Image: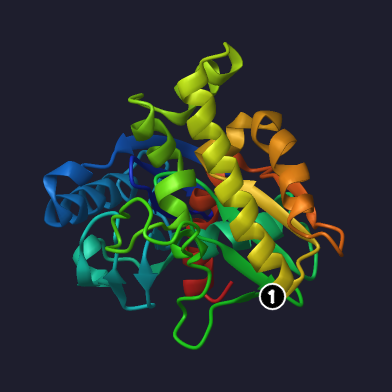
Amino acid sequence: MKFVAAIDVGGTTMKGGLVTRDGELLHAESRPTPRAEGPDRVVAAVSAFADDLTDTAAGRPEALGLAVPGLVTPTHAVYSAAFGWRDVPAEAFTRVDVPVALGHDVRSAGEAELAHGAAGRSGEVLFLPIGTGIAGAVVLSGALYGGSAGWAGQIGHIPVRPDGLPCPCGGRGCLSAYASASAIAARCGERSAADVVTRVAAGDAGAAAVWDEAVDALALALATYTLLLDPAKVVIGGGLSLAGEALLGPLRPRLAARLAWRPPPALAVSALGTRAGLLGAALLAWRALGA
């Protein structure tokens, strides 16, 4: 059976695996992303992960797909606010002797959602993973839209609070500073956004205030996106999607309230969950083979 290796590099966790052409996961594992140790250490960790995935008992993969955050071209990881790297060439991430495809993590995950998940073959969709950061995969007329330089979809850096909280990108008041899973957790002094959701459910007023502000920020950003591009559906992925109706329940009416004269798009959680980026990286690898 032919398969490819794939790695989805997240701000907290790297997910790797071996994937068949139809999206079956033959092997999957996760490793921590050593973000606190600097960009060079992250690149080295990705390279070591790639080495291990291409030398398994299952055999040798046909190609390797790498999905990374930030500004990405097929040849370089141009910039990442999460890691602080700049202009890292694709070959720096791996020493394996198979075809290597480098791509943007969110657009790759969005493509996986189109192929296997909740987005289906809808014409206009925003796939919005919310994890360490926030970015969107923009789908127009059934195709992913990258913009003039391939950098479209950076909705996480839309200012939702002018002169608000600082963001790792260097700006202030960005959506990510309020509504990313990492920001929600940090503002409540917790290790994860899941801990915050638990506190909200238990009636904790401080956690509820942070959660409320995150939902408001998301509603504002999604209203702006909706008025510009008129999506039929918004699919929320990443770790925060695991909150389910605790997130979508309050988000639906607040988004509708900001779109007074028109109906809001449908909101759904990712059918692939946290596997979307990994399956998207596999699609990159298959494309490198012409599949």
Q: Nearer the viewer, residue 165 or 29?
A: 165
Render colour scheme: rainbow
- Secondary structure, mark 1, is helix
Asked if one can make out residue 94 in the rendered structure from this viewpoint, the answer is no
Label 1 amino acid?
A: Leu
Does 89 sit left or right of 21 as displayed?
A: left
In the image, residue 64 sits, relative to residue 269, either above or below, namely: below
Judge by depth and name the residue closer to the eye, 263 or 42. Answer: 263
| Residue 113 can be seen, yes or no | yes
Q: Position of residue 128 (x, y in %)?
A: 59, 54
Q: Position of residue 49 (x, y in %)?
A: 27, 46
Q: Is residue 75 left or right of residue 106?
A: left
Question: Residue 96 appears in which quarter of the rendering?
Answer: bottom left
Q: Is residue 286 above or below residue 258?
A: below
Residue 76 occupies quadrant: bottom left
Residue holding disc 1: 228
Residue 113, horizontal then vertical, whole percent: 66, 55
Residue occupying the point 49% across, 45% down? 179
**Residue at the limit of the structure toward the top, as seen here:** 202
Residue at x 64%, y 51% (from the top left corner): 219
